[in-house]
Image (spheres, rainbow, N blue to C red):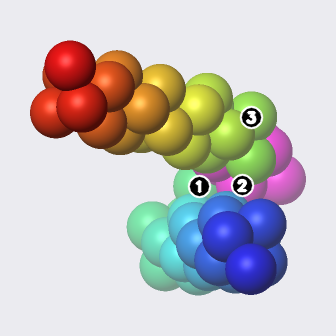
Amino acid sequence: MQVFIVLALLVAAVFASYKLALEKQQNKIIWPAITLLIGPGIFIIQYLVSVFTDKRKIA
């Protein structure tokens, strides 16, 4: 279930980046690609922070 939520957020971020690039007349391929590459990194960092925060609460 969480995988689907993460994928949906990533797709939404790429779509928003594409629409913003269209609106601002920027490159329509590079900006969504950068968002796609940076997005998973951000989700991984967020996941690791949540894991370490949960471990602190248990200990």
Q: Which residue is mark 2?
A: 32
Query: Depth-wise, is mark 1 or mark 3 nearer the camera?
Result: 3
- Percent across and percent down for residue 40 are 68, 40
Label the magenta part by its dominant secondary structure.
helix
Q: What residue range appears in magenta?
A: 29-35
Query: Depth-wise, is mark 2 or mark 1 nearer the camera?
Result: 2
Q: Earlier in the sequence, mark 2 or mark 1?
A: 1
- In the image, taking residue 48 as reference, residue 52 lies left or right, namely left
Residue 56 vs 30, above or below: the answer is above
Label 3's element?
helix
Q: Is residue 47 magenta?
A: no
Residue 17: image tag: none
In depth, the one of 48 and 12 nearer the eye is 48
Residue 21 vs 51, above or below: the answer is below
Q: Which residue is mark 3?
A: 37
Residue 37 vs 24, above or below: the answer is above
Q: Which residue is mark 1?
A: 26
